[in-house]
Image (cartoon, grey):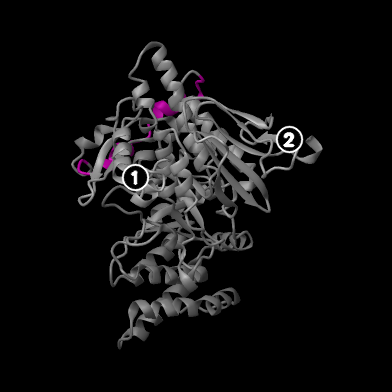
Amino acid sequence: MPTADATFTARRDALWPQALGALRGLIGQRPETDTELERIAASCAQAYADRPAELRALDERRLVTPDWYQRSEMVGYLAYADRFAGTPGGVVERIGYLQQLGVNHLHLLPMPGERFEPADLRGLGEALRGRGIALGVDAGPIEPDSFDRLFDEVFALANAGVEVIRIDPGKVPEVHILLIACRALLGIVAPGVLLLAGATPNPGSPVDWFGRGIATGAECQLAYQPTVPTMLWSALAEQDVRLTRLVLNAVPAIPPNASWVLAARSPADLDFDISNDQAAALGLDGAAHRSFLADFYSGEFPGSFASGEVSGRDPETGDRRIAGTLASLAGLERARSLSGADRQSETDLAIRRILLLHALTMSLGGLPMINSGDELGQFNDRSYLADPALAADGHWLHRPPLDWAAAARRFDPTTAECRIFSGLANLVEARRRTPQLHAQAGSRVVEVGNNHVLGVLRESPRGTVLVLANLSARAYSIGLHSAPWFAPGAGLRDLISGHPEERTVRMDPYQVRWLAELPRANR
């Protein structure tokens, strides 16, 4: 075992008892238990000794800015390496593209049946760090009786420069105990590295990934939030926010050292997980409402703008899940099949919907994640059906190879690609200069006097922001003269546009505003 220095000793003394308690719960009491624990301890010490000096320095910076992943500056981008740039090495040549968009976290996924070797990631991680972008990849999946191999893989990825490691829980019943151990061991070796939960626990709630009971805040720092995107798509189909307001206000709070990951479209598919009780609270039939949403986003409902496809069905309830890219679900694919004035007007509305969904995931609390291709408005890609390795999985409909010819059009203001890319980059920049959107800020849905307009209040010592989103194709005015969230007579500013606003706020179709009080000197 390598000679321990003062830093390692301090971390080990603080965190090994926590790791040990979890490890004993995993391994149990048997004759070889002590030997296994000694091997894990030795592996931990060796990984610390092997950690490059540059990454140790990064750990120290992360320790003095422990909320770095919760700050409004953080925006992520999710891509399959093969479909984005061919290989991890090829991604290096595309870093400038990510910088133009403004993202500072890149999460790369391997193709099915493949995995990244740490040696293949080292150069990419270094290149990304040099441009201020944190690299994330997946580890696992976890298999029973292979816990020590998972720890070794996590240590190797961390020492290759990976800063966010997604853990796929597989079918391990002790997954929460395992995550406690993994988090503690990483805290000894590489405290600047985060754990991202790979899927929703079943049974359980996504908030469980952050730790429960006395382990609250001791498991993953990041987990995908499935409820918010589900309810945004529901409100968009209904053009009504009442059910969304009810459901979002019931989302449980998370620990102060954790953050949701929010995507406008789930990396998997649209799963309309709205309970019968939630629907009944507004006089709706749950099964009928879920069926309506599936019909709407598969394009079967009369007047729907969407072009999704059914990707799965619950064998017990018959509820359907829907696959589709953000642009196809939001109406851009259908709009481009039209001609003349209809094509122009429907294209405009579809782009407004796309940017609305991005603006909401940027502001409702957490680390926003952009799915590759969504920044260009790419359509459903049915070419996966010709690939025997992919054809059985309908999710590949919304995982197209990045269209670099379309990306070249992002500078042409006459194109949809430019409107979406530049609009999204503007939202990223607006978020960056709005510290009130920190993940620790409270988030509650409020009534604003109009059931077509969603109001979400973000409150913290950093300040207050009222997010307004018009989920309909009509314009409305929202009166805020007596709103209790702002001082009487105070002027307002839209933090997206930067322009001052009156207390009666016009909301164009599918428009989003982030409203805050003007500084006193500007009133």
- Quarter where residue 272 is shown: top left
Q: Residue furthest front?
A: 283
Q: Identify the mark nearer the N-term, 1 or 2.
A: 1
Which residue shows up at 39% across the image and 49% down it?
278
Q: Which residue is mark 2?
A: 491
Q: Which of these two is toward me, 387 or 339?
A: 339
For badge 1, the amino acid type reads Phe
- Residue 484 in sight from this viewpoint: yes
Q: Which of these two is toward me, 302 or 492?
A: 302
- Residue 92 in sight from this viewpoint: no
| Quadrant of the snapshot with the C terminus | top right
- Quarter where residue 301 is shown: top left
Residue 350: x and y, percent?
A: 43, 26
Provide the secondary structure element on which disc 1 rests: loop
Q: Residue furthest right?
A: 521
- In the visual, does 266 lie left or right of 222? left
Provide the secondary structure element on which disc 2 rests: loop
Judge whether 194 appears above or below 13 on screen: above
Residue stretch in magenta: 391-413
For badge 2, the amino acid type reads Gly
- In the visual, does 49 lie left or right of 466? left
